[in-house]
Amino acid sequence: MGYGRPAHCDRDCGGVGTPHGGSAVRHHSAMPVQRGTAPTLIGLDVGSTSIKAVLLSPGRGVVHVARRPTVTHQVRGGGAFHRPDEILESAESAVAECASAALSGGLAAPAGIGISSMGESGVPVDRRGAPVGDILAWHDPRPERQAAWIERQIGAAALFARTGLRPEVKYTLPKLLWIREQRSAEFTRLNRWAGVSELVGLALTGKLATNASLACRTMAFDVTARAWDAELLRLASLEPSNMPEVVPLGAAVGGLGEAAARRLGLVAGLPVAIAGHDHIVSTLAAGVVRPGDVLDSMGSAESLTLITTRPILADEVRRTGYSTGCHVTDDLWYVGGGLSSSGAAIEWFIDTFLGEQPAADRYAAFTALLARAAPGPAEPIVRPYLRGRTAPHRDASAGLEFEGIHEGHGLPELAAAVVDGAAYHVRWMLDELGRLTATRMERVRLSGGGTRNRRWVTAKASLGPGRLEIVRAEEAGALGAALVAGLAGGVYGSVTDALADASPFDRATAPATIRSRYDDAYLDRWLPAVIIRLRQGGQA
């Protein structure tokens, strides 16, 4: 998202405060000085909006980024899918561009390829390793009836205790049941199931394997044992042998095949590794690997990922709307939750009130409105649930609501209130995460396009909890995949070594007076208003 100027100032700013008495940003770098002629690394992230590949030069950082759109096809009446050939062609094209950039830039040849991707989406592959049919998009709503059937068979609490997931339509197991019922000819040919990362890895190496962070998004994976759940798979008439092998972090799926090497302009036998689920791989790129650390990914939707040393599977976690999963590293887990309309609420505001302006000018106009607003917090309060609320306390009927507007308020105050409302909700999510997991969160790192919104970052720095740091890497999923490639290719001897090339970050702070005002507004006005809504709905 392009919400105005970057929240962090230029490197020589010396921690100068931002407008509105906003956050001062101090600079820290996790990037060491250049180490000479270390091999380069390629990280690929196949996302639901775009496909990104980065060329990482250890000690220097990302030196090239290749981007391709992810083509999504819509089904009349609902449904969405990707075509395997289109995904593979775009992914290989992006990797080939990075390989060419290494050669033309006089850099050392790549020592490995790492792959991350969206979770949940996937496709059957036959006994020859060819995809059968289309890739159902993770957000395809068609398997809704199958998800409800799974809940009746297993029970929501029992399912969460094993998988860390609620029975929702987006996960893989309902998709498998839907394919068995609606695409029986394709299901009959299913020899193995391949998620998007696994499909790309299969095309490059001829081998099928995955990482636990992707496997745990299928709703057929025991997050405690970190193994396929045979009973859940039998619901879809499958066995663990039909699923990808789960390999440790940094283990190569296989070597780059000769035909793939020719297509990509690389050397056959190059190690190829599955890095994992892109949201979780991003924590590696951000250096968020310490228990109690949180990554706050800010985009149209916003997701929080709290790192834990064990799976947190208490039923209250499920009932409060969070999920538990496996981290990309083999001895960590996470608890996560999201707000589907944080940046989307800002986009709604821009489209509704600034839509008559050319698209290129709308974000600048929104930033100008924020600059005209008084220092935070805004007087009106906003509950930012444009698309319902997932966590805490799931409520699909929750809406976008303004409260406390009077005739003295104009567009600047309303724009600021939308931004502040999204920040208040994240504070609530973090407070609930800390309570449910008995974790004291001392460090939160922000990533994504929302970090460029200075007012938003100031509000978050004011509300806490803990130290707030802004990740500079724009393609964190691809960077994390490149770090995993380095583990597979022997460039790094450990995760600790790889973290030397994680993204640099900037420290964000806010003056004590603003922190106090935001804290009072959250505790005295915003949170009580939300709790009243919960009680009216019988949820609290």
Image (cartoon, rainbow, N blue to C red):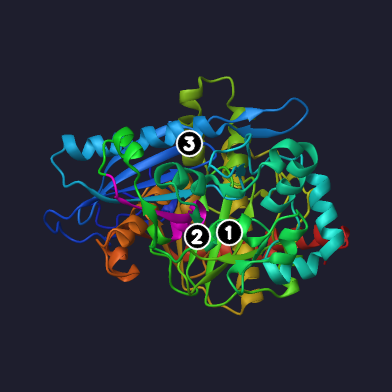
Residue 186 position by quadrant? top right
Residue designated by label 3? 50
Q: Residues within 10 Å of mark 2 (few under 14, many from 20)?
A: many
The amino acid beneath tag 2 is: Asn
Who is closer to the viewer here, 148 or 179? 179
Look at the picture and state if 327 lies above or below 357. below
- Drawn side of residue 330 relative to residue 9, left or right: right
Marks 3 and 2, how far apart in space?
21 Å
Place of residue 152 in the rendered image (x, y in percent of width and height, measured from the top left): 87, 60
CB atoms at circles 1 and 3 under 8 Å apart?
no
- Drawn side of residue 147 relative to residue 66, left or right: right
Residue designated by label 2? 211
Which residues lie in the magenta part? Answer: 268-283
Between discs 3 and 2, the one toward the N terminus? 3
Look at the picture and state if 492 lies above or below 449. below
Image quarter (top left, top right, bottom left or bottom right) of the C terminus: bottom right
Residue designated by label 1? 215
